[in-house]
Image (cartoon, coloured by chain):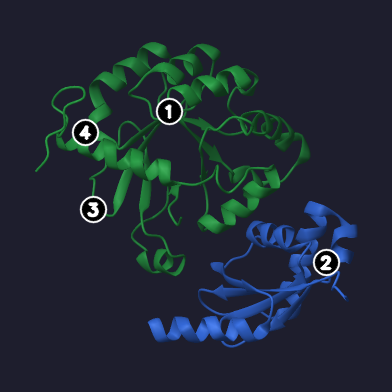
Chain colours: A blue, B green
C-alpha cells in the first residue's frame, strides 16, 4: 500500500483591512520560521504563500511543520490585524467551509 | 474557547468581532475601578507596577477593602513570602506569571499547592511577541516545564497587542503546554462564581440564594 509520507496543509489567513502582497508576506514568514525553528525545518516545510480572494491568503506547508508555521504566523510582526480562519488538507474543503460561513451570515 | 484576558481599548468593537471574542476582559490598576458591564469582566493584578508599596501588608489591606469590586484578582509574586500567601488565600484567584516574576520559587511542591487550592496560573506570553531571546525565555520555559507536570490550569494572556486565543495556544504549544491544560473553562467558571458573590448571592459560606 502506498502511503504519502508528506501530507499538505492549507492555512487560510484572513486580514482585517487589505491582504498584503503574497511575495512580501512569504518573505516575512520565512524569516520568522527560520528565526524560531531554523533553516532545516524551513527547508523541510515546503512553505509557500498563495493569493486567494479578497482580504485572504493561503499558506501551504506540510503536516509535520504545521504547528510551527502556525506559531510563526502568530508571532509575526504585522501592522494589520489578521487571524487564521481554517486549516485544511485540500483547497476544495477550504472553499466549502467559506461557503458555509457565507450561508450562516 | 475564544476568551482572553488582556488590557486593550475595548471601544473598537469591530476588531474584536473580527477576532471573534465573546468575552472581553479589562485589566486595571488599583486606583482605576472600572464599571462592570455585561460582556466584560474586570481583572485586578496586584504587582509592583499597580501598587507602589507592594508588600504583604498592602495586599491584605487591598483585599479587605476592594476584593468585591473585581471578578478576578491575581498576584504577581515578587518574593517567596507573597507567593506562599497567594497560594493559600481564598480571595486570590490566580498567580500571574511572566519572565519578570521571581521564578526560583516555582517548583513542583508549589505547583501541587496551587492545584490543591484550585488556583489558576495566568501566563503572560508577551515576551514572545515583543523580543524573542533565548536567554529571557530559558528561565520561563523551565518553570512551565515543571508546572506543566501538575494539573494546574493555565490561562494565556498577552499584555500588549491583540492576538486571538488560537494564536496564543499555538505559542503555548511551543512551550510544551497541552491544549487541555490551557482550556479557559476554569476561568469562565471562576468569573461566574465571583459575579454571584459580587451580586450578594452567597450571604454565608456554603449558602446560595437562588432566584
Numbered disc in front, either 1 or 2:
1
State the CA–CA distance, disc 3 to disc 2.
45 Å
Residue for badge 4 = B197
Foreground pick, B140 / A31: B140
Q: What residue is drawn where x is 36% and y is 54%?
A: B23
State the CA–CA distance, disc 1 to disc 4.
17 Å
Residue for badge 3 = B38
Does A57 sit left or right of B18 as displayed? right
Q: Are marks 3 and 2 on the same chain?
A: no
**Disc 1 + disc 3, Cβ < 8 Å:** no
Vertical comparison of A80 with A72: above or below: below
Q: Are marks 1 and 2 on the same chain?
A: no
Give me the chain letter of mark 3.
Answer: B
- Residue B108, given in percent of the width and then of the height, sits at 62, 21
Q: What residue is drawn where x is 47% and y is 65%?
A: B19
- Residue A102, given in percent of the width and then of the height, sits at 44, 85
Sequence-wise, the earlier of marks 1 and 4 is 1
Q: Residue A45 — which label?
A: 2
Numbered disc in front, either 1 or 3:
1
Does B180 sit left or right of A36 as displayed? left
Asked whether residue A100 is in view, the answer is yes
- Residue B43, given in percent of the width and then of the height, sits at 36, 39
Residue for badge 1 = B118
Query: Element type at marker 1?
Result: loop
Vertical comparison of A56 with B193: above or below: below
Query: Element type at marker 4?
Result: helix
Query: Element type at marker 3?
Result: loop
Vertical comparison of A101 with B78: above or below: below
Report crowding for label 1: few under 14, some 14 to 19, many 20 or more residues within 10 A (C-alpha): some
Foreground pick, B190 / A2: A2
Q: What residue is drawn where x is 24% and y is 34%?
A: B69
Q: Quadrant of residue B195?
A: top left
Amino acid at each position: 500500500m502506498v502511503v504519502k509520507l508528506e501530507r499538505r496543509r492549507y492555512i487560510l489567513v484572513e486580514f482585517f483591512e487589505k491582504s498584503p502582497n503574497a511575495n512580501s508576506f512569504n518573505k516575512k514568514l520565512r524569516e520568522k520560521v527560520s528565526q524560531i525553528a531554523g533553516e532545516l525545518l524551513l527547508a523541510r516545510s515546503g512553505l509557500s504563500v498563495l493569493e486567494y480572494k479578497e482580504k485572504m491568503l493561503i499558506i501551504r506547508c506540510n503536516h509535520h511543520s504545521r504547528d510551527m508555521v502556525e506559531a510563526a504566523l502568530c508571532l509575526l510582526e504585522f501592522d494589520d490585524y489578521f487571524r487564521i480562519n481554517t486549516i485544511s488538507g485540500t483547497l476544495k474543503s477550504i472553499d466549502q467551509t467559506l461557503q458555509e460561513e457565507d450561508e450562516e451570515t | 474557547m475564544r476568551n482572553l484576558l488582556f488590557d486593550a481599548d475595548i471601544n473598537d468593537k469591530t476588531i474584536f468581532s473580527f477576532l471573534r471574542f465573546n468575552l472581553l476582559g479589562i485589566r486595571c490598576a488599583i486606583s482605576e475601578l472600572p464599571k462592570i458591564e455585561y460582556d466584560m469582566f474586570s481583572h485586578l493584578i496586584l504587582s509592583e507596577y499597580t501598587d507602589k508599596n507592594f508588600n504583604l501588608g498592602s495586599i491584605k489591606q487591598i483585599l479587605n477593602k476592594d476584593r468585591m469590586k473585581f471578578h478576578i484578582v491575581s498576584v504577581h509574586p515578587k518574593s517567596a513570602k507573597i507567593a506562599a500567601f497567594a497560594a493559600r488565600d481564598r480571595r486570590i484567584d490566580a498567580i500571574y506569571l511572566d519572565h519578570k516574576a521571581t521564578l526560583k520559587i516555582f517548583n513542583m511542591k508549589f505547583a501541587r499547592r496551587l492545584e490543591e487550592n484550585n488556583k489558576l496560573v495566568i501566563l503572560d506570553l508577551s515576551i514572545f511577541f515583543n523580543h524573542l531571546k533565548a536567554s529571557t525565555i530559558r528561565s520561563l520555559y523551565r518553570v512551565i516545564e515543571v508546572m506543566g507536570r501538575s494539573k494546574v490550569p493555565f490561562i494565556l494572556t498577552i499584555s500588549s497587542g491583540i492576538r486571538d486565543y488560537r494564536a496564543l495556544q499555538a505559542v503555548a504549544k511551543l512551550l510544551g503546554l497541552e491544549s487541555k491544560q490551557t482550556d479557559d473553562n476554569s476561568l469562565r467558571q471562576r468569573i461566574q462564581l465571583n459575579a454571584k458573590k459580587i451580586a450578594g448571592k452567597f450571604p454565608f459560606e456554603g449558602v446560595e440564594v437562588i432566584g
